[in-house]
Image (tube, helix red, strand yellow):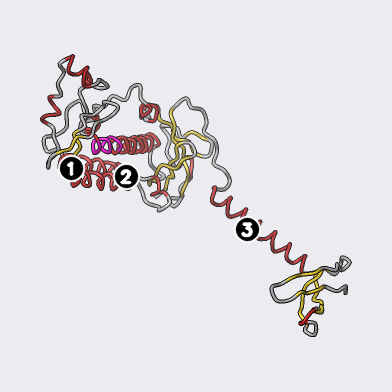
Amino acid sequence: MVRLHVKKGDESQFLYDTLVEARIEDIIYDITIIYNGRLKVSRICYEIEELIKHGTMLPHDMMGLTDEQVEELKLKDEWGEKCVPIGGWTFNKDVIGRRNGKQPNVKMQEVLKKTIEEARTMVSKKLVQQEKLVTQKTVQEALDILRGAVTIVYPMGLPPHDIIRQEFENTEDLSGTQASLEVIDVQLAQLWFSGKELLPGTKLKDYVGMNEKTKIIIKLQKRGGGRPAREPLMSEEERKQLMLHAYKRQEQLKATEETKYMKLTTVRCEGRYSNSEVLVITNQDRPSLRMNHWTPLKKVEAVES
């Protein structure tokens, strides 16, 4: 299997295995679906965190309104009365007026929090360092456990206008949001390897040869973005190790040079230690300097050699 290290810009995304005989259009499709799926998992996890704190979303005509405005307009969150968390709730006002404030109890919060952590781990970018793959199946499993946890806490389901439910049903509207800029349409997706675009209608072997044990870095981007920057000759970690090695080598050479011009000299001690002798190091190539070196017990005077 050929292992593809998928990047977006300079940031690692996930690992993907394929064959040298695989068609480029199939690879583009799979990688784009996985990439967008990971984004969906991330968006849902964020919204569930908001669900944990402030309950289900308000209807669009009530969002951002004060209690006085809601009362004046005689608006009512009918779905919020039906879709309540199991085990009861406590009121925790959403200061931005996006959710109804009906926070699940602590036990149900923990169910959702643990599931969020598990789902994020399943599609984490850190899996690249662990040499673990992310597939369409992996993404689907992450979505399934998130859906299951929400169903446990909200057995009556979520309101149809809640973004979490829309994400699960693939009816979300991301227009005008930052998330819409991150998603890549399959028809507009491009893959680049070593400064060359992998063109639909060709096969992977046209770019990497017939060796199935190859590992390469490919860049995913939207069409029209231009040629992505080439990979640096060494990674950031390799660069740090090289600099550390150079520093250690420089220190070793410096120590060797200093040792070459040093010698041991006998000095006499003054005071009650005048009959004793100690060894110190002085610079042979420079005129010896007379100095007084004080210690808590004795004074030592260096003598010219």
Q: Secondary structure at mark 1?
A: loop
Q: Which residues are magenta?
A: 46-53
User: Is residue 261 in sight in this rendering?
Assistant: no
Q: Which residue is mark 1?
A: 105
For the residue marked with disc 3, what is the amino acid? Answer: His
- Toward which corner of the image does residue 125 lie, by quadrant? top left
Q: Earlier in the sequence, mark 1 or mark 2?
A: 1
Q: Secondary structure at mark 3?
A: helix
- Toward which corner of the image does residue 170 lie, by quadrant? top left
Between 212 and 88, the one lying in front of the other is: 88
- Toward which corner of the image does residue 52 lie, by quadrant? top left
Asked if labels 2 and 1 touch by Cβ distance under 8 angstroms, the answer is: no
- How far from the left and from the top, in percent, is residue 63? 25, 22
For the residue marked with disc 2, what is the amino acid? Answer: Arg
Identify the residue shown where x is 69% and y is 73%: 296
Q: Which residue is mark 3?
A: 245
Q: Quadrant of the C terminus?
A: bottom right
Q: Main secondary structure of the magenta part?
A: helix
